[in-house]
Image (cartoon, rainbow, N blue to C red):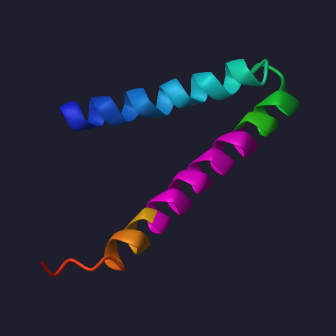
Amino acid sequence: MKIYFILVFFILLNAFFIISNNNLQINDAENLKEFLNLYFQWFSQIKNNFTEITGNVINQNWIP
């Protein structure tokens, strides 16, 4: 239950940051489209960062 709360909190907090940093009014359809575009770009960048980190971890020499 705590994991879900933390995940939802993280997603909402980042959505609010995107809205405030770009001065978006969500009640306007054009701004809503821009928000969704920015949010999915952010989410895609998170995915790319995780794959890059995972690739770097896999390529490490873990033999002592």
Position of residue 26 relative to residue 51, above or below, is above
In the rendered structure, does residue 15 fall within the stretch colored magenta? no
Q: Residue furthest front?
A: 64
Percent from the top left, x then y, of residue 1?
18, 33
Percent of width and height locating residue 20: 69, 18
Which residue is located at x 49 percent, y 67 percent? 52
Q: Is residue 48 left or right of residue 1?
A: right
* Residue 49 coordinates in the image, percent (x, y): 51, 58
Looking at the rendering, which quadrant does residue 35 occupy? top right
Q: Is residue 26 above or below residue 8?
A: above
Q: Nearer the viewer, residue 28 or 55?
A: 55
- Give the image location of residue 8, x and y in percent: 39, 32
Image quadrant holding the C terminus, namely: bottom left
Q: Which residues are magenta?
A: 36-52
Q: Residue furthest left?
A: 64
Where residue 36 sits, quadrant-wise, is: top right
Left or right: residue 7 compared with residue 61:
right
Q: How many marks?
A: 0
